[in-house]
Amino acid sequence: MKITDVRAIQPVGENSPPDWRTSLGQILIAIDTDSGLTGYGVGGGGLSGIHVVRTVLRDLLLGQNPEHISRLWDEMYQSTLAFGRKGIAIMAISGVDLALWDLKGKAERLPVVSLLGGQPGQRIPTYRTVWKTEDLESIEPHAGYKLHLGKVAAPDQQDQMIRAIETARSLIGPDPLLMVDAWMKWNLESTVTISKAIVPFQVDWIEEPLSPDDLAGYAQLKELSAVPIAGGEHEFTAAAFSQLIDQKLHTVLQPDVCWCGGLTELIKIYKMANRAGLRVCPHRGAEIWALHAIAALDPQPLAETGRPWMTWVTGQPEIDSGLISVSDRPGWGLRFDEQSLNLIY
Ligand SMILES: [Mg+2]
């Protein structure tokens, strides 16, 4: 099998802002082959990511055997090293890598979960991410809920956060998991103070309180926080995660498979974390790209949901009574119709 074309496009959907999460938008990668099979993956970086695919990665991939995923990943990384390593170039590589895994599954007529040694059909619990406590007033059943919180710049804002977390716990009741996401907007002192105050509300983790570059801050938090710290959503490549894992800077690691380098890197992150006794809970885990790895590699599977704007990836599994599973269809198992896409580029 040989690669005959690599296409990168930016679709939009009904709930899909073109500037998704201020991160330039998600991109679809399609890899065509001389076998007639096409593999699909989703990466990040918007038009900048598309530029990386069209000007660097496509030339490198044309004529190659798509089943040599690991070697191709290394070649893509080397070809973008001077301007890449983190961010847009790795987001673009992620989409290509996921499309290569789709092709491998389709060529072997196996779902990706089976390529990883797992079984399709396993029912995985989900947790829902919300941005307001009001969104927890009437909830569908999930194993847990995660509340996004705002910036903490003054002591009275700390009190607002603590009250919001108390409200969230009272709204969901005592049983479901409760997590909070600070999205890099707190600091060391406020995180320590808030963590101690929210112990009675049984919070499973505080997510990304500090910048991903503040490894010294996370090293202090490891000692000082009264609640486990999660992070990694904005980190890239297994090499960078190895530093987080070796120093145990996060109790829960949250790579985003569409940004961190694709499934090739997510597999390495799972292996390192499992060996270190740390938990992996991929960002956007209920989307199909991470779900196969969760099903195959995760001793404590939990899939994040709550992002309805990815409507253009059709054929993803539905959540049923708070549970989700991957099908036995080959590759990612998507039933994908390119003709239905509304493109902006
Ligand atoms: Mg987050």
Image (cartoon, rainbow, N blue to C red):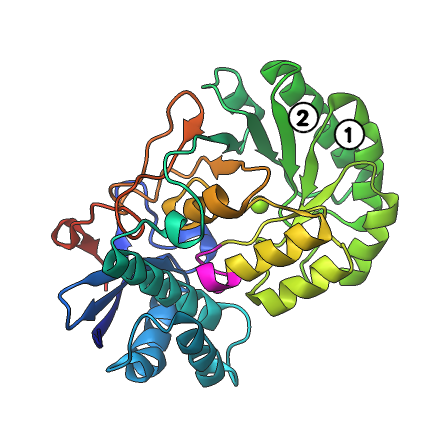
Element class at badge 1: helix
Mark 2 close to ligand 1, CB under 8 Å: no
Taking 191 as reference, is 291 left or right?
Answer: left
Observer-nearest of 171 and 302 = 302
Label count reads 2
Residue 234 lies, in percent from the top left, at 58, 57
Q: Where is 10 relative to 227, above or below? A: below
Amino acid found under the numbered disc labelled 2: Ala
Quadrant the N terminus occupies:
bottom left
Real-space CA distance between mark 2 and mark 1, rounded to the nearest whole angstrom: 9 Å
Q: Can residue 234 be seen in this view?
A: no
Identify which amino acid the numbered label 1 is placed on.
Asp
Q: Give the crowd class for mark 1: few <14, some 14-19, many >=20 residues within 10 Å.
A: some
Q: Which mark is residue 164?
A: 2
Which residue does the numbered mark 1 point to in the structure image?
A: 159
Give the residue at x 51% y 77%.
84
* Residue at 70 percent of width and 39 percent of height: 206
Inspect the magenta stretch and tell me whether residue 261 lies in it.
yes
Q: In this view, does 107 lie above or below 15?
A: below
* Rendered view: 116 above or below 179: below
Rendered location of residue 224, percent (x, y): 87, 44
302 vs 344, left or right, is: right
Q: For mark 2, give the secondary structure.
A: helix
In the rendered image, residue 133, in percent from the top left (x then y), is placed at 58, 24
Quarter of the view holding residue 171: top right
Q: What stretch is highlighted in magenta?
A: 257-265
